[in-house]
Image: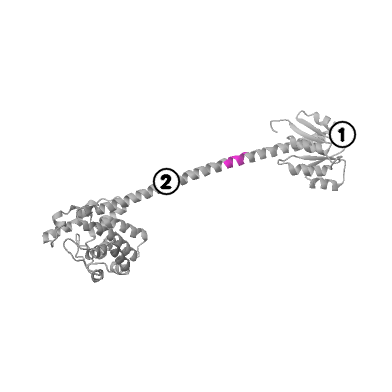
Amino acid sequence: MDERQATILLIEDDHANRELLVELLAESTDYRVLQAADARTGFALFAEEKVDLVLLDVMLPDESGFNLCRRMKSVSRIFVPIILVTALHELSDKVKGLEAGADDFLTKPILREELLARSQSHLRTKRMMDRIDRYRSELSLFNQRLQEQVEIRTRQLQTALAELRTAKEEVERTRVEIVERLGIAAEYRDEWTGQHIRRMALYVWEISVACGLPPEQAELFRLVAPLHDIGKMGVRDHVLLKPEQLEEGEVDLIREHTRIGAQILADPRTELIEVAGEMARHHHERWDGQGYPDGLKGEEIPLSARICSVADVFDALTSSRVYRADAYQVLEARSEIMAGAGTRFDPRVTEAFARAFDKIQEIWEQSR
């Protein structure tokens, strides 16, 4: 309406009154006037044209102006002001008109100044309402497009997060596989070592859980357990694979695998390698301080190494070695571990070992 001439629909059955109103309105070049002499024609024009204001006579030959007003208000999806033009002066008639949805009244005989003033006032209101409707429409369209963009961006973000999770999982799988493959590298020199480290990792997990450690820490200990003997890669074959009892100097060479392992895992950049280095260096320390390589005592020994020590000795006792053909029976090995509580092993770790023994025995049986 801001960019076009305002359209006024005049519905008046009396020809003389209709001509008078048209003449008064014609004095303003801002208006385009549509005329109807009955309700049927008026309603049809209202439905077909973009009407900005309706001047509606109350007394029509085919339908009352009140009823026509109600019908026009009910079908219009936008605001269109309706002024009832009437010769009725009773308050009840005005109430009836307001109930029908009328926005204003003009009482016959009509004065030019009042007609133009009321028409202009309601047309200004109409322009304001049209702007509001247009802004609402534009805002609704903007919100719709914004919602579409949000949904697109959300889907893109979800896809990116899924790809990130997949990549992270792949990195984690790769990291675990590298650790495991480093751990079994010694298998090429010592067939026993490969099976040993697989069982060791499971034993360490069960003992860690029985110690009451959080699952994340127990899993960390399980992951690094395969690296506890990585230093054996630096021990000469004639010592590592010797079928007879080792001599004193050879024992010293075997013991060097703890230092070699610590050197391989030195200067860690991750917690995983840091814990692996602790386990590799200290899994032969003793609770009473008589172990090697550093003679640490009690809780000076990292917890990871204390748990590894119990798992390592149990698996060694229950496995055939190049220098010992007969393995201990499982229950005998269990008794050996428990007998070492407070001297060779951390008492708290041995108690956890006892609590987890059923699961440890199951692992041992499944690996045979």
Give, as a three-letter code, the residue at label 1. Answer: Asn
Pair 1/2: label in front: 2
Q: How many callouts does the rendering have?
A: 2
Nearer to me, 326 or 237? 326
Q: Could you tell me residue 277's position as x and y percent?
A: 26, 55
Q: What secondary structure prevails in the magenta region?
A: helix
- 23 left or right of 255 in image: right
Q: Quadrant of residue 343?
A: bottom left
User: How many residues crowd mark 1 within 10 Å: few (<14), some (14–19), many (20+)?
Assistant: some
Identified at 30% across, 61% down, the residue is 202
Secondary-structure class at tag 1: helix
Residue 163's disc is 2
Give, as a three-letter code, the residue at label 2. Answer: Glu
Secondary-structure class at tag 2: helix
Q: Which residues are magenta?
A: 138-144
User: Which quarter of the rendering shows the C terminus?
Assistant: bottom left
Residue 17's disc is 1
Q: Quadrant of residue 26?
A: top right
- 111 left or right of 173 in image: right
User: Does residue 127 sit above or below 275 in this rendering?
Assistant: above
User: Does residue 132 sit above or below 335 in this rendering?
Assistant: above
Question: Colour mode?
Answer: one colour
How far apart in space, not on screen, are marks 1 and 2 (Cα)?
Answer: 77 Å
Q: Could you tell me residue 64's position as x and y percent?
A: 84, 43
Identified at 77% across, 41% down, the residue is 72
Confirm whether residue 51 shows in the render: no
Nearer to me, 302 or 176? 176
Was residue 121 drawn as part of the magenta stretch in this picture?
no
User: Which quarter of the rendering shows the N terminus?
Assistant: top right
Give the mark nearer the N terminus: 1 vs 2: 1
Nearer to me, 61 or 30? 61
Confirm whether residue 237 shows in the render: yes
